[in-house]
Image: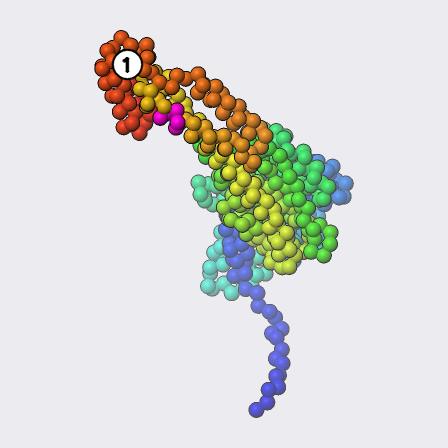
Amino acid sequence: MTNELTNISLPSDIVIGKDILELVTSAMYIDPLTIYREYIQNSVDSIDEARNNGLLASNHGIVDIHIDLEARNVRIRDNGQGVPNGEFARKLTSLGASSKRGTAARGFRGVGRLAGLGYCQTLIFRSRSADDPYVHELRWDCRAFKKLLTDNHFHGNVSDLVKAVASVSMIDPIGWPDHFFEVELVKPLRIKNDLLLNEDEISKYLSKVAPVPFNPKFKFGKKIKAFLLGHLALDEIQIQIGPGKSPVYRPYLNEFSIGDSKIDVFTNAEFRVIPGHSGGVSAVAWILNHGYLGAIPNAAGVKGLKARKGNIQVGDHRIFTAIFPEARFSSWTVGEVHILDEKVVPNGRRDDFEQNAHYAHVTHQLVSVGDYVAKLCRSNSMVRNRIKAFDLGAQKIEEHLTILEQGVLRRSQADAIVQEIQGEMFEMKKAAGAQILNDEDRDSLVARHQELETRIREIRPGADSSDLLLRYPKTERDIIQKMIGLIYECSTNKVAAKSLVDRIMARI
């Protein structure tokens, strides 16, 4: 028996079955709203091409999203380069054969345009490039597509399936733009309260993932943009959802809500340059500092250190959670990392990056950012604790002072309260002098401490000769004061006890 191997020829025809399309159109796009990201991504690449060819100025890239609720129809149209008539049918029916791979384009796998197949009854593509005589249209029958995918009697391959459910036609160009690309989704599925036709939800989603500008009201927008433009082309576009509506802006504003009653404010922007694996720059990042009051709610739209490649978001706010010493601090963070390294590539679903040494290098370099933010979280928490301790002490002293100001306690009881006040004042002075406080907070607490000291000096420590009780014989006065003292001693709520004593004194 020998160990020699005999080579066997591979089949002359490699079988690629229809089921591959089911994986591409359903398994890759679990979140329905990602279909908008895929089509916007293609629009951005087309707009970039139009800019490079002089068809558009740098700030004239527009994507219009028209939603017809009554007809259950969505149309996404850009004013980009468009697909030439002579290439339209071949390009739009090819699968995984994009010519964009190796270029600066954001989409390069040639499957993103199929995202809508699983979410509507009919999917239509229309396009025209400059000087084309016609508008070309590719129409997919999505219901027939889904039926054939599950039909055990249909044994055709991918090519046979496409030919069975897709058709191409020409349209008279009158009334159509000179150059454009358009996607139309006819009767999208009713998913999660009709998510695919919900203008507000679509706008919120695209404000986070698409390359749209910062809101003009956001005071750090210009500073962040200037920093980013020093390292990459942002290639921003205008997205309009519905006529007369405001364009879609990034979700960052000057403040955001923490829960129902707390508002946090952005105080400044910080920037980081991440060195490359083999020289150069692999990424740049910006962080917005704020009060670090706690985990930021998802509804704020700004939560997390997010990743962008080609100025389009990759993954969600959890993508860099591992760089933080404690995962919870990821939810306290506001910022973005723009990937510049060409070898750091989004995966097919664009929910993460392909795992390689270059991506590992970026995440390793970002650990220092995670540590820095964690330090800010902890230090701000310590500051809040110091201020909270001071406020609690001040509250107790206020309660004690109002009791002394009643002037009805015996001197021994009043002296005991004064001793408690002095103990609280000592602890408050330590809190006010903590090195972790900034100058503004420290000065504020010191001033409040001095005001309390002044009030304490003006309070009479006892009430043996109080005008309120002088009209009573000493024996009765002693009984009243003892009773009042017992009320304060036995009460856990000094405010309520004082109110009771005030009512008693008013009656007697």
Image coordinates for residue 429, horizontal then vertical, percent: 49, 30
Residue under the point 57% across and 50% down:
323
Figure quadrant of the C terminus = top left
**Depicted 174 relative to depicted 353: above or below:** above
Q: Is residue 418 magenta?
A: yes
Residue 258 x/y as whole percent: 48, 35
Under mark 1, the amino acid is: Met
Vertical comparison of 299 with 458: above or below: below
Specify the color scheme: rainbow
Asked if residue 438 lies in the magenta stretch, the reply is no
Q: Which residue is pictured at 62% across the width and 86% down the height? A: 4
Could one spot residue 326 in this view of the protein? yes
Q: Nearer the viewer, residue 369 or 284?
A: 369
In front of the other: 43 or 201: 201
Helix, strand or loop under label 1: helix
The residue wearing badge 1 is: 505
Front residue (pair 165, 437): 437
Q: Within the image, what quadrant is residue 205 found in?
A: top right
Residue reaching furthest top? 471
Q: Nearer the viewer, residue 310 or 91?
A: 310
- The quadrant of the rendering that contains the N terminus is bottom right
Residue 456 point in image, percent of width and height? 44, 20
Q: Is residue 481 above or below residue 197?
A: above
Instruction: Residue at 50% x, 33% y: name it.
Output: 430
Hey, which residue is sitting farthest bottom in the picture?
Answer: 1
Looking at the rendering, the stretch of residues picked out in magenta corresponds to 416-420
Majority secondary structure in the magenta region: helix
Q: Residues within 10 Å of mark 1 (few under 14, many from 20)?
A: some
Residue appearing at x 58%, y 28% in the figure? 440
Looking at the picture, how far across and down is residue 297, in whole percent?
A: 48, 39
